[in-house]
């Protein structure tokens, strides 16, 4: 892009970022909502010839929001102390933070003993977005913020799904002429072009729609009289149809796992809706079901898992962070060499297990895998308990939010069996962000933006009586 054509883009960016940045400093929750709104459209940067450094805007935004949060919290320290005196006690740390922190510590130790500084990329890929729940702990979303967050997810899910179906109508040749590349964004399975929408690949698109469905459906069914929820429920077949054209088995598996949880837990009507959604998939372009049901890809992956874990063996503390998977690609590209070579039809000589549990086992050993499983189980358990809380603790809408986050977490756990889920942007960021939202359900106000005094007194007191003992 020439300097002349780059200037309007830079001016437009400044026109948007300056007022939004000012708002985020005054109230960091605005920055979080803005991040939720923009992340699904990061892939559109592929169509614009911008300097490579622009691609790091996500990390820069997270760090900027963190700094804004710390500044705001420091300036409001007196108000925060006053709130603690009113409630009589502080907030309790959710149990999933313990194994998550242990997993992070293992990754950092692994990096510290790595002979290559490029292994820092592995830490960044795996753990950078843990900053989001830290921010949300310091600046919790209040009830209005959470409602806006759900709206943003619903709207973005509908927009990206419509764009995805539009891509199927345009076809690969037109998409290539726009600027998308074959074997990168434009991919095929069984002769069918895989939808990628506004993302860089089909995988993040399918997983994003999966999260939107599991998060939005319980909220919409809880209050069917609201126009927003009615429109979302009407759009569900479109979302499922568009997601199915991405042909991502992990997303379909995750949707099935999360949907089953919602059916068993509360919404039996979804059992009937699942039949209609299955029909929507059957009506999709091309023999999608045949491609999804093909066992060849899964057989190839399981053969690789057995070869690496059983035949090659696993080191007690793993081979080191960033040595396997997507992080290994970036680390090896950064260091200019390939330390390990594995046959793989997906990534040439870089082994891609397409299983986050196998990846963790190879990188951090059995102990790292244990901490990962403990973190997942604790997060799911925490969300499940919140979804069953009494009305005096959490209102019906927030219970539905907890139910949706729990379903999305279960879906992530299921998808991790056939995909490196927590290496796929932006669903890795959304996973940690949604976990960061859970603790805010137990208090009606943010420590940075207090609600009326009567809410500050009543609901956190009930929550504290219900919550498990501090870790």
Image (cartoon, rainbow, N blue to C red):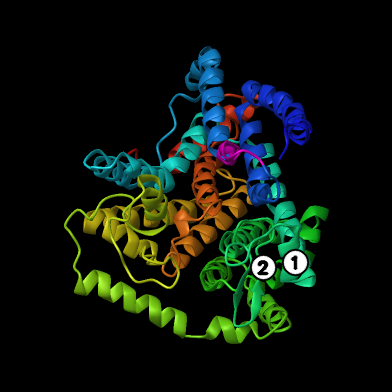
Q: For the N terminus, which image quadrant? A: top right
Indicate the position of residue 235 as horizontal and vertical percent values.
Answer: 77, 65
**Residue farthest to the left, as pictured:** 316
In the displayed structure, 292 sits above or below 246; it is below
Q: Which mark is residue 334?
A: none
Marks 2/1: CA–CA distance: 7 Å
- Judge left or right: residue 371 versus residue 64: left
Q: Are marks 2 and 1 in contact (CB under 8 Å)?
A: yes
In the image, 266 versus 250, the foreground residue is 250
Residue 320: percent from the left, percent from the top? 26, 51
Which residue occupies the foreground of this view, 33 or 117?
117
Q: Is residue 334 above or below residue 65?
A: below
The residue sitting at the front extreme is 2
Which of the two discs, 2 and 1, labels the residue nearer the N terminus?
Answer: 1
Residue 110 can be seen, yes or no = yes
Q: Residue at x 37, y 47 (%)?
A: 122
255 to the left or right of 301 = right
Q: Please name the residue that numbered disc 1 is placed on.
A: 167
Q: Mark 2 highlights which residue?
A: 195
Q: Secondary structure at mark 2?
A: loop
Crowd rating for badge 1 (residues with CA inside 10 Å; few <14, some 14–19, many 20+): many
Quadrant in the rendering for residue 140: top right
Label 1 sits on a secondary structure element that is helix
Taking depth in this image into account, of 75 and 230 the one nearest to the observer is 75
Query: From which residue to which does the magenta span run?
Result: 50-57
Give the prevailing secondary structure in the magenta stretch: helix
**Residue in view at x 73 percent, y 64 percent:** 175
Q: Residue furthest right?
A: 227
Q: Is residue 34 magenta?
A: no
């Amino acid at each position: 892009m020439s300097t002349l054509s780059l200037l309007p883009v830079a001016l437009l960016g400044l026109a948007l970022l300056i007022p939004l940045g000012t708002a985020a400093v005054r109230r960091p929750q605005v920055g979080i909502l803005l991040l939720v709104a923009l992340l699904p459209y990061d892939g559109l940067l592929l169509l614009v010839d911008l300097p490579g450094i622009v691609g790091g805007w996500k990390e820069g935004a997270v760090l900027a929001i963190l700094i804004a949060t710390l500044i705001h919290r420091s300036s409001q320290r007196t108000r925060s102390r006053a709130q603690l005196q009113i409630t009589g006690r502080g907030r309790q740390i959710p149990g999933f933070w313990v194994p998550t922190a242990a997993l992070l510590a293992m990754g950092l130790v692994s990096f510290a003993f790595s002979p290559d500084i490029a292994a820092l990329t592995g830490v960044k890929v795996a753990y950078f977005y843990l900053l989001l729940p830290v921010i949300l702990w310091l600046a919790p979303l209040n009830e209005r913020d959470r409602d806006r967050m759900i709206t943003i997810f619903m709207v973005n899910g509908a927009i990206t799904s419509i764009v995805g179906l539009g891509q199927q109508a345009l076809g690969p040749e037109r998409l290539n002429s726009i600027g998308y590349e074959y074997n990168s964004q434009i991919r095929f399975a069984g002769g069918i072009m895989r939808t990628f929408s506004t993302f860089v690949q089909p995988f993040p698109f399918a997983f994003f729609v999966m999260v939107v469905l599991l998060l939005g459906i319980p909220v919409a069914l809880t209050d069917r009289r609201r126009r927003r929820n009615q429109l979302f429920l009407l759009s569900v077949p479109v979302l499922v149809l568009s997601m199915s054209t991405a042909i991502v088995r992990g997303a379909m598996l995750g949707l099935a796992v999360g949907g089953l949880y919602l059916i068993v837990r509360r919404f039996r009507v979804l059992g009937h809706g699942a039949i209609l959604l299955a029909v929507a998939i059957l009506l999709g372009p091309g023999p999608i079901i045949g491609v999804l049901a093909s066992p060849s890809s899964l057989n190839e992956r399981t053969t690789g898992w057995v070869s690496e874990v059983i035949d090659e063996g696993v080191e007690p503390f793993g081979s080191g962070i960033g040595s396997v998977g997507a992080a290994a690609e970036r680390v090896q590209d950064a260091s200019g060499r390939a330390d390990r070579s594995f046959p793989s039809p997906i990534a040439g000589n870089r082994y891609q297990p397409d299983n986050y549990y196998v990846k963790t086992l190879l990188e951090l050993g059995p102990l790292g895998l244990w901490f990962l499983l403990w973190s997942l189980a604790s997060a799911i358990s925490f969300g499940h308990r919140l979804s069953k809380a009494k009305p005096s603790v959490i209102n019906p809408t927030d219970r539905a939010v907890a139910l949706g986050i729990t379903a999305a977490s279960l879906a992530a756990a299921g998808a991790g069996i056939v995909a490196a889920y927590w290496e796929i942007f932006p669903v890795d960021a959304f996973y940690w962000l949604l976990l960061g939202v859970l603790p805010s359900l137990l208090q009606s106000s943010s420590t940075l933006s207090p609600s009326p005094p009567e809410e500050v007194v009543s609901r956190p007191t009930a929550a504290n009586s219900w919550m498990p003992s501090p870790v």
